Image: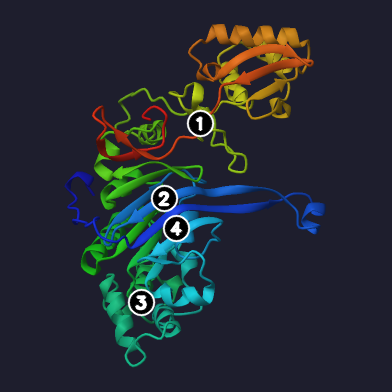
Amino acid sequence: MKPETHHRVPVDTTGQPIISIKDLSVHFAMRGSSISRLFGRSSGSVKAVDGINLDLAPGEVVGLVGESGSGKSTLGRAVLGMAPVTGGTIEYRGREISALGEKQMRPLRKKLQMIFQDPHASLNPSMTVGESISDALRIHGLHPDDRPAAVAAALERVGLAPASRFSPKYPTELSGGQKQRAVIARAICLGPELLVADEPISMLDMSVRAKILGLLDELRTDLGLTFIYITHDLASARFFCDRVAIMYLGRIVEIGPTEEIFSNPRHPYTKALLAAVPDPDPSREIPKELPRGEVPDAAKPPAGCPFHPRCPAAFDKCGWEARDLRVVLEQRWTSVDLDTYEAESKKFGDLTNAETTDDKAVVKPGTGTAEQLLADLAQIKRDNPAEPFFSGVRSMAVEGGGVKLEFKPSVQPELLPIVAVNGEPESAVSVACHLYH
């Protein structure tokens, strides 16, 4: 499987999109203590999808790429009415479907189908492969007079031939790749226009992944299918997708033609994803600047740009706040001696308890005085003047038994095209990053 030799099918993006997503949000309420649950009180929400705008042209393959928890699967499920929409709209061929109930969505499910990640859980173990496909046809009232022929045609279309051999088999009698082919057959037998493929090859053996991806590509060409391809596998996205949308904490941070995203990534997160791809030659030692820290809690996303706490290129307006100091300190403590670590960690105490407002925070000392804490902060800044956290700090002063940090205003970056000096779009790539806007 060589991405550079893959022939892409031309896609007409000038007409009406088959799917149009506008300002889509999917938030899941969190429940706190047993008392809170008893009275139905929410203790916040997880913003799984937060303000997504995306159009899909008929016959196009758009890949959603990102780490676990980025909102890829939730976005795909929302398009199919399988996740509750909190805000925004989803339109299918100009008709809004995001507010439809299950009864109203059912007729549309023939045209909007999903391929799930786990083929082992996608098939009913008590039904044969033929019965599973026939049951899907029965539910939607298709081919009432010739269902066995329709089942056989679907099986042979996905490479399970002869159909008479595979139709009477139970899922336990099939390999992982054969099960996924059966799942794909069940989806295409309904005559869909859109397939949401949620990590369709991630649970398969390496020996069959390329074959399943090749099958999906053939179906896309022969049947004119549109795909939302959800994956964390950058190689498969490069092979299969016309466009790639990079997602982070429920937002698209970069989107554009596949080859341009891979050859000239703009967003620091996209660059980090590509840098993390293992080199096939273990003898080559290539330095990699990977993001510091961990993926933030989606229930309490960072202010401003969601990637800024981990970004090596962040600067003053990216959204700095008190909890970012913890990341700075943890990185510092990996490079100092044990005595320095123990002394400083005791002085700073628990930073999660810092009194924080929109642009201010008061950090209380764990041990010692506020004056000593301020002196330590000043020393840390002198030791690493390039640390981006301090670019967002307007002032540091002793106040109220702690150190008050005043932050510069944060701005959440919008997903916008990159504009050249003459005001024209520089390329077909859009990016949500203050480095470009």
Q: Is residue 101 above or below residue 56?
A: below
Q: Earlier in the sequence, mark 2 or mark 1?
A: 2
From the viewer's perspective, is the residue at label 4 or at label 2 nearer? 2
Check the picture and name the quadrant holding the C terminus.
Answer: top left
Report, in whole angstroms, how far the alpha carbon at label 4 lies from the one at label 2. Answer: 13 Å
Characterize the local packing of mark 2: few (<14), some (14-19) or many (20 or more) Cα atoms within 10 angstroms. Answer: some
SS assignment at label 3 = loop
The amino acid pointed to by label 3 is Leu
The residue singled out by tag 4 in the image is 76
Residue at image x 44%, y 72%? 171
The residue singled out by tag 1 in the image is 411
Residue at image x 64%, y 11%? 377
SS assignment at label 4 = helix
Q: How many marks?
A: 4
Contact, CB < 8 Å: mark 3 with mark 2? no
Report, in whole angstroms, how far the alpha carbon at label 1 lies from the one at label 3. Answer: 46 Å
- Work out which residue is located at the far front of the displayed protein and give it: 423
Q: Is residue 238 above or below residue 149?
A: above
Picture coordinates of residue 394, whole percent (x, y): 58, 16
The amino acid pointed to by label 1 is Val
Query: Residue 178 appears in which quarter of the rendering?
Result: bottom left
Q: For residue 419, which numbered disc appears in the image?
A: none
Report, in whole angstroms, how far the alpha carbon at label 3 lies from the one at label 2. Answer: 28 Å
Q: For residue 53, which numbered disc appears in the image?
A: 2
